[in-house]
Image: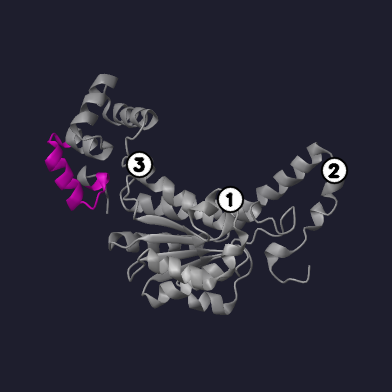
Amino acid sequence: MLDDRLTEQRNPRSREIDRLPASEVVRLINEEDRTVAQAVGKEAEALARGVQLLVETFRNGGRLFYVGAGTSGRLGVLDAAEMPPTYGTDPEMVQGIIAGGYEALVRAREGAEDHPEHGAGDVEERGVRAGDFVLGIATSGSTPYVHGALARARELGARTGFLLCTPPSPELRAAHDLVIAPLVGPEVVTGSTRMKAGTATKLVLNTLTTGAMVLTGKVWGNLMVDLEVTCAKLQDRAERILQVTLEMDAPGARALLERSGGRVKTAIVMHRRGVGRAEAEALLERAGGQVARVLGEDDG
């Protein structure tokens, strides 16, 4: 394909995919998809560094910004949008920036990725500053919009990272605090990075934010005790968490959740420590939001 980017190479296993019946097309795509998690797993060390960087960022009052174009940008916006309902975070804490603006979420605007100055301008408009972390997502590694955004973010004093699915150059590694490069190989349809590269991107973003949320006290055991009770589904989940962890019946869990202001974490501390809402919140504040520390379950 006269292009050294791994994401633009032809996959020898799918050269005749247009001649296959539906069952074989599905089988081939599925076989290729199975390699994605393994490729992401090989980046475990970089992912762990990324989680620690995010923990430091959040604990010091900084924010995470994803920057991308097309599929990469949409996945960043998606991950950011899921943080408040799942972990009760301020919407400003994790933000997604996509080339072409929010219109590009529902309609492709491919030319938007060609302008580094637009990336720089969008970072400025969001108020990126020292203490923030900006993760550029460009599976090909070459998107001008993303490079422009990251260059401006560094000038503004923010830490930066790069997520790509082709081997990173030494210059790219030197330029950023973090580089994550799951090498998923050529796509089934050449250059269609919404497929394996997109799946790898989703896995990476899930791992980074989930890891950071766990380590900053948004999870107790494996329960999302900082969820926002904003709909019937989450109300039900919150009540069930209290029923199981506090051995309560449904009416008791519902009443406790109401007294806690709809905060599962606060409700657990109120019940276990026998205190009111204000004192429970103060205990959690002193413990950095860690339920285990308040309840004396933290060996550290």
Residue 268 lies, with reference to residue 212, above or below; the image says: above
Tell me the residue at 82%/48% (across/down).
17
User: Which SS class for mark 1?
Assistant: loop
Name which quarter of the figure residue 241 lies in.
Answer: top left
Residue 277: mark in rendering: none
Dominant secondary structure of the magenta stretch? Answer: helix
Q: Residue 184: horizontal and vertical position, in percent?
A: 65, 58
Q: Earlier in the sequence, mark 1 or mark 2?
A: 2
Q: Earlier in the sequence, mark 2 or mark 3?
A: 2
Residue 20: mark in rendering: 2
Is 289 contained in the magenta span?
Answer: yes
Q: Residue 189: horizontal and vertical position, in percent?
A: 75, 53
Q: Amino acid at mark 2?
A: Leu
Name which quarter of the figure residue 236 lies in.
Answer: top left
Return the residue nearer the eye: 109 or 291: 109
Residue range in magenta is 273-293
At label 2, counting other C-alpha atoms closer than 10 Å, the crowd grade (few under 14, some 14-19, many 20 or more) is few
Q: Is residue 173 left or right of residue 253?
A: right
Residue 221: mark in rendering: 3
